[in-house]
Amino acid sequence: MNFCNQCGAQVDFRVPPGDHLPRYICDSCGTIHYQNPRLIVGCVPDYQGKILLCRRAIEPRRGFWTVPAGFMENGETLQQAAARETYEEALARVEIGSLLTVAHVLHAQQVHVFFRATLQEPEFGAGIESLEAMLVDPKDIPWADIAFPSTDYTLKRYLEDRAAGRENHYFTELDRRLPR
Amino acid sequence: MNFCNQCGAQVDFRVPPGDHLPRYICDSCGTIHYQNPRLIVGCVPDYQGKILLCRRAIEPRRGFWTVPAGFMENGETLQQAAARETYEEALARVEIGSLLTVAHVLHAQQVHVFFRATLQEPEFGAGIESLEAMLVDPKDIPWADIAFPSTDYTLKRYLEDRAAGRENHYFTELDRRLPR
């Protein structure tokens, strides 16, 4: 960040009085520009035991497989965001179920939240951000070509829980920041 | 938002190609400035059946009571954020427990996340954003002077669950937006 998005003046980066972290500060209009983690929300769509995966048409990780997920928008719930992303990326309508995983992706300043979901009909396709979509049997999941660690973590917890007949939720931390 | 925080040019507000919502767009450097919900994270600190509350020294809702909570920072987990806020607002060290509530605060473009927590020692005080802190018996909670609907919802779910001997988690929507 170089400029104040309110008044257009150059910003400084320092700790404001009474704060404990450096922030982008506009000394012209007084605005402090806080930066906070963003929410990525998705789901694991299940249709009669098969999982709906999408192959990414965009970077990062173009060509790799993931479950439907994306940035949460203002004005929607986590569940609505998960269902919307599933429609946008895989042209599939899902019923969102229980909370499955929360991954703190510290290097990306993101929190990833995934839910269980049910696909009512085997209707799906490639949305504009996907190269293709497919329903896969768990034994055929392309583990070596999964796009993100949070996707991998989420699919594994989902399958373990389903095999055990439970619906727990799980937290994890993913941190690729350089050592301090 | 009036100016691009990257290059300082004026921004336009329109739907980018391939998108479905209007965004702040810089036609000078090409940056699209997405705006997403922010995470507010807190906990319900319990000490031998009593709850730790803080009275707010800052707006909004100065003078009203809440449980410790605040904006999640980059580089921390939800649980770390909840513990940090408890120390900052109530000078108390807590052990964060299970997920309690998620409130989608749609008019504020925020997601509030609360955990159960345990205060190991009855040591607390007023942090710089609090007028005072107190340990209260549930029957003495000042319900008419609770700062936010998400705090009220969270305290009620906590007490119901504790009385029932369970630790569920709950989602809710709070929406004070004007009718469309």
Image (cartoon, coloured by chain):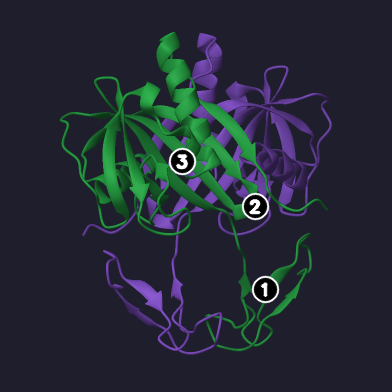
Chain colours: A green, B purple
Do residues under tags 3 and 2 come within 8 Å of each other at their CB atoms? no
Q: Chain of mark 3?
A: A
Precedes in sequence: disc 1 or disc 3 = 1
Residue B178 vs residue B28: left or right? left
For the residues labelled 3 and 2, the Cα–Cα distance comes to 21 Å
Q: Please determine whether, in this image, residue B141 is positioned above or below residue B108.
A: above
How many tags in the picture? 3
Which quadrant of the structure image shows residue B12?
bottom left
Precedes in sequence: disc 2 or disc 1 = 1
Q: Give the residue type at disc 2.
A: His
Q: Position of residue B11 (x, y in %)?
A: 42, 84
The residue positioned 21% from the left and 39% from the top of the image is A93
Residue A24: numbered disc: 1
Precedes in sequence: disc 3 or disc 2 = 2
Q: Chain of mark 1?
A: A
Q: Please determine whether, in this image, residue A19 is positioned above or below residue B13.
A: above
Q: Chain of mark 2?
A: A
Q: Please determine whether, in this image, residue A2 is positioned above or below residue A22.
A: below
For the residues labelled 2 and 1, the Cα–Cα distance comes to 19 Å
Between residues B179 and A149, which one lies in front from this camera angle?
A149
In this figure, which residue is indicated by the disc labeled 3? Answer: A145
Q: Position of residue B77 (x, y in %)?
A: 65, 42
For the residues labelled 1 and 3, the Cα–Cα distance comes to 38 Å
Which element type, helix, strand or loop, lies under badge 3? helix
Determine crowd level at label 2: few under 14, some 14-19, many 20+ residues with C-alpha closer than 10 A.
some
Q: Give the residue type at disc 1.
A: Tyr
Which element type, helix, strand or loop, lies under badge 1? strand
In this figure, which residue is indicated by the disc labeled 2? Answer: A107
Residue A24 vs residue B146: left or right? right
